[in-house]
Image (spheres, helix red, strand yellow):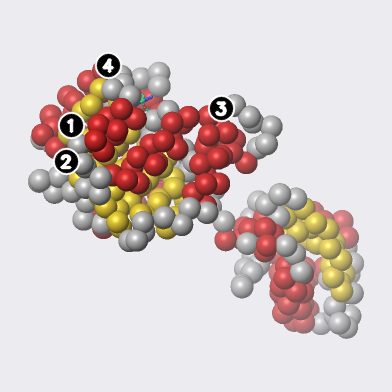
Amino acid sequence: MTIAFPEKFVAGVVAHINEDHRREMLDLAHGLAGQNWASEASLLHADKHGLDLLLHAADREERLRVTFDEPLERPNQFRPALIALIQRARQALPDSAATSSRRSIELSDALYNYLHAVSLREPEVLQQLRAETARNPEGRMQVGPEQGQFMALLLQLIGAQRTIEIGVFTGYSTLWTALALPANGRIVACDVNAEWTSIGQRYWAEAGVAHKIDLCLAPAAETLAALLADNQAGQFDFAFIDADKASYDEYYEQCLQLLRPGGLIAIDNVLWGGAVADETQQDADTRALRALNAKLHSDDRIDISMLPVGDGLTLARKRLGA
Ligand SMILES: C[S@@+](CC[C@H](N)C(=O)[O-])C[C@H]1O[C@@H](n2cnc3c(N)ncnc32)[C@H](O)[C@@H]1O
């Protein structure tokens, strides 16, 4: 593990270490708060005998006094001693603290825009649909464009031809899917709202992919049950679950039957704005998501990865023997 110390920080410490300028050291540490390394360890105080550190874990903070083996007399002794000490301190911490440095980066508006600027290849028809959806009062229900593009890539990676979409809304994620599928690709698109989905239908036609999309306006559990009754088990490559949260578990079980071994289920909103990790949140949707997340963690029918994409996205691959 490597800890990167900003040059400014090291230079400041070296300049002050032998003078014991406590006030400046504290100011320096506070001034660096928010930089990457400071989200793991803040320096509260330093002198030639040792350091007072505040170590930040995901769920708490821990204060630690570490002492050098010998008092530091020369500035060039400081940097390697500091790195060795912090590594030793971090190894003594529980896992949550030790892994926090590798957690996903927080996205400022500027960074989010940058990410789009250097990676998004959103076709114009999708841009137009996204702009129209943004004017809808419920527009935040739509997945972000980087998530749509990511799922399109997944579809190409697994060579998907037949997919299930549970929760269409204005058809944005459905359109990403339709554009990613080959000419003979087909989507069973489930929703209960004719008004919202009619917006999508206009854009699907404009994009020339309407023939790939079978829109089923009925509760999704009924549509999926009908597919199973029609001997469609094992016939699908991919399913995207993004509808009413209370039914997610039912959709998951149905999709698992409908998927071929090696097929992929993507489940949206699994972090639910952070509510799943907040025990004071006990509404039905949060509890349903929490229960499903726990269930999937130990479900040996699938391989999983939960990603901090959008509002949280779980990928579940149906195992070959399942
Ligand atoms: C979060 S939105 C889907 C967003 C869409 N995937 C996108 O990225 O644009 C949820 C959708 O689920 C639909 N829905 C709610 N309950 C449903 C049910 N029981 N069966 C099918 N769809 C349902 C809603 O009408 C809504 O359009």
Query: Which residue was labeled with disc 2?
Result: 186
Packing grade of label 2 (10 A; few <14, some 14-19, many >=20) is many
Total number of numbered discs in the rendering: 4
Q: Residues within 10 Å of mark 1 (few under 14, many from 20)?
A: some
Amino acid type shown at disc 1: Asp
Residue at 40 percent across and 50 percent down: it is: 315
Question: Does dot 3 land on a helix, a strand or a loop?
Answer: helix
Answer with the quadrant where ligand 1 appears in the image: top left
Task: Tell me which residue sits at (35%, 46%) in the image.
Answer: 256
**Residues marked 1 and 2 touching at CB (< 8 Å):** yes
Q: Earlier in the sequence, mark 2 or mark 3?
A: 2
Pointer 3 local density, CA inside 10 Å: few below 14, some 14–19, many at least 20: few
Residue located beneath label 4 in the image: 195
Q: Is residue 99 above or below residue 70?
A: above
Q: What residue do we see at 28% from left, 44% from top? A: 258
Q: Which mark is residue 214?
A: 1
Q: CA distance from mark 2 to mark 3?
A: 33 Å
Q: Is residue 127 visible?
A: no
